[in-house]
Amino acid sequence: MSGFDCDVAIIGAGPSGIAAATALSKAGVRDIVVYEREAEIGGIPRHIHHPTFGLLVFKRPISGTKFIKALLKRCSNVRFETNTTVTALRAGGVLDIAAPDGNRRIRARHIILATGARETPRHPRLISGLRPIGVTTTGALQQFLYGARLRPFRRAVIVGTELVSFTALCTLRKAGIKPVAMIEENRRITAYRPLVLFARLMGVPIYTNTRITGISGREVLNQITVESPGSGTRHVDCDGLIFSGNFVGENTIARTSHLQHNQSTQIPQTDQNWLSSDPAISVIGNALHPADMGDQCYQEGLIAGTFVADLLVEKVSPTGAIMIVNHDATIKMTTPNIVRQQGDGDVRLNISLHVTRPYTGPISVTCGEQILYLKTRRCMPARRITLKNIKLTASQFETMSDLRISLGKPH
Amino acid sequence: MAANPSQETNLPSQTALMWDVIVIGGGVVGCAITRRFALAGAKTLLLERGGDILSGASKANSAILHTGFDAPPDSLELACMQAGYREYLDINERLNLPVLKTGALVVAWNDAQLAQLDGILTKAHNNGVNDARMIGQTALLSREPNLSRDALAAVEVPGEYVIDPWSAPLAYLTQAVGAGAQYRFDTEVLSGEFDGSFWQLSAAGQTFAGRFVINCTGTNGDNIEQICRKPAFEIRPRKGQFLVYDKTAAGLINSIILPVPTPTTKGVVLTRTAFGNLLLGPTAEEQEDRWNAPVERDILQGLIEKGVSMLPDLPQHEITATYAGLRPATQFKDYQISAEAGKNWVGVNGIRSTGLTAALGIAAHVEHLLMETFPGITRFGPAKTPTWPRMPMLAEAEPRAYQQGDGSEIICHCERVTRREIEQAMSGVVPAESLGGLRRRTRVMMGRCNGFYCSARVAELSSKGKISPPLAEDRDQ
């Protein structure tokens, strides 16, 4: 084939992008380039100094910075271009690229989007109050402290109790910033319950069943107001407010492209082999399932990269009938969110999902009248739930029905 | 920025630090008036209590350049809006300011509103907006296919446009500075004395002497007016809350979608912004506080409901920002602009929600009023030949710095702001001296991530400028 600038262009150098590059390179694909818009490789883990990485990949806990270094050691014959932004994704494997040394348009035989996730910040949460300096997110805080070596405030409140919220707690302590309190809207924390003890040992109160109802300070944050059914309204003095977790996929490039998206989640349609509606484009990592662990993203990227390598030598076919995966509103998203038949055969797949509120009970996967999966599961928000070994037959693809995932018994 | 003003003057008995005109208040109106007098040859000083221009009412509006089709007939507001509209379109290209020629549709959503469209059309024609016309449901929905089917008909006003509400006033002040004007931020005027020839204004521990004072203090207008006279009006701040949707939502509409107005408010508008977003708002809420405008969750949720009733696909799009502004309304409908003949004072008050459109027209009116009221002044000095500063282009539809390849990396990924743009905004003729000023000059941190990706880099870069208060302190100290 001619007219291509590279074999595979990967957008995003976080764990999943690095993994895809590694797998492609190992499979013998020659010309692989990873575009990273930040100055440094590594995505979100690059600024995380706590040992919340490595358990799956290296069988031991290591920090995010070390995790990335270790991953890069396994990745050779790959070109990384930092400070390089992909500004548009087009049909035919075309990317528009902006970089300090000039803008250009390139064409790749295959593109992999690995653009990651970000936390939901203040404004989309519709938090009442003024707009002072000092309101931020965990990701931004870590970049302040570890990237720029700047301290944005002295006394901070953390909103949220996901695992990432507790890394924010550690980050504050390490930087000499006083964690004043953690605030959780629900009755229990989102992360594993023992972390309550961890916060207590640090002397940080967790206010559950509590909402933030006000932000004060004309220029610089000086106080927040919180409200709970039990204790009413109270004011908390602080000059920092960290909105943690509630991750959303950073799908900007996909959203403004020709790719199809899931109607309810607006996540790019992606099949069980991470191919999007355009079979020359894959989507992987936390852009699809905000936000799983870095290790999980890495493992997924390896499998997705291997599939792309097979695709490039035409060992597998990218075409086939497509079935949409629908789900209840209490399911945040599923991965995959479409299933694509390979030729005219059956398909076996795993489906992972996140829930929006705690749930214990049956989960079912149905196709028309047929029940493909029914098991009792315990689900917590912000954690991956995997439904394993679901089989779709060729005749089910012919019925043109959707796949339906429900919390509760099938109707 | 504290150099002595020019020695050149034709007014007698002035010392080097004597200003011809002191403008109080650096909103869009104050900036336009400063420009007007500076270009007319007056030694002009602008005093602003905030850390940047546009710290009050002017920082939050719907960014529409209005034709005046629905303004009160024969009002000063209408005259200033139409003069301002014309002058903006006359100068915007030379200042590199964008115009998004969307047109507007005043949409009727029920029979009662439908019955009012004829009156709106007649008023538009009477106001000289002759290209306004009625369009029926079929034409309306083919032009705006994403609108709810409840839309019945509309008055189309082709001349309603969208502009950049922050770069325009910055351009006015930048051009004024090019003509010799000066400005002071963080300088709140507390009192003043008039000795029969000159005003001595006290602000930020200093005294500023000027021959004429022009009060453009927006929501503080009646308080500042007390320095000269008993105000004939009372400021009744009216809060407006807005929601900004992500750039993916801008394609949902082609035109500005206006409601049929009620006696108290123009109502909730849906409009694209020059920056490529979709804007929903404002509310209209009376409040006492002159200075602080918090957003409120319940009100924002009500706004969203209102928006969804007009655009059912809205929930598929991310909200990127919420904000609130205060309009300096008074008990009167019209602007409250008047000169105090014996005291060399002009009050420019009650500029409600049309100030962005009208500012240049108000400036021309105020200059005329001053010359008329004080006939001894025929001119201040030789009129300046204007220089035309080219503003950084922030509009989505126009080539941005990153697209032209300015040789530096993108720092703010949501709004695609380059490092060089940030550096230049802190070193220009009117450099950013606050985070708000930096955001308005570049759009940095204004996008969907609210600074998740870029705020640390922005803090790092801004520590090389004069940004106050700083975003962060050195961690190792």
Image (cartoon, helix red, strand yellow):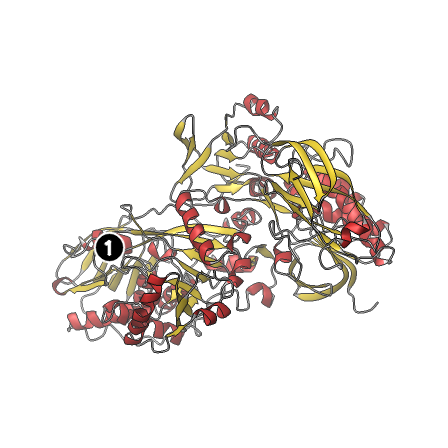
In the image, is A189 to the left or to the right of B308?
A: right
In the image, is B469 to the left or to the right of B330?
A: right
**Which secondary structure lies at badge 1?**
helix
B477 in relation to A392, above or below: above
Residue A371 in view: yes
For the residue pair B477 and A330, the one nearer the viewer reads as: A330
Image coords of residue A146 (percent x, y): 60, 40
For the residue pair A8 and B209, the one nearer the viewer reads as: A8
Q: Quadrant of residue A372?
A: top right
Q: Residues within 10 Å of mark 1 (few under 14, many from 20)?
A: many
Residue at horizontal 45%, vertical 42%? Answer: A127
Image coords of residue A129 (percent x, y): 40, 42
B378 in relation to A39, above or below: below
For the residue pair B133 and B387, the one nearer the viewer reads as: B133
Residue at horizontal 44%, vertical 74%? Answer: B93
Q: Quadrant of residue B350?
A: bottom left
B450 in relation to B89, above or below: above
B258 in relation to A352, above or below: below
Residue at horizontal 39%, vertical 28%? Answer: A232
Residue A21 in view: no
- Would you name the residue on which mark 1 appears? B221
In which chain is the residue bearing label 1? B
The kind of residue tagged 1 is: Gly
In the image, is A99 to the left or to the right of B274?
A: right
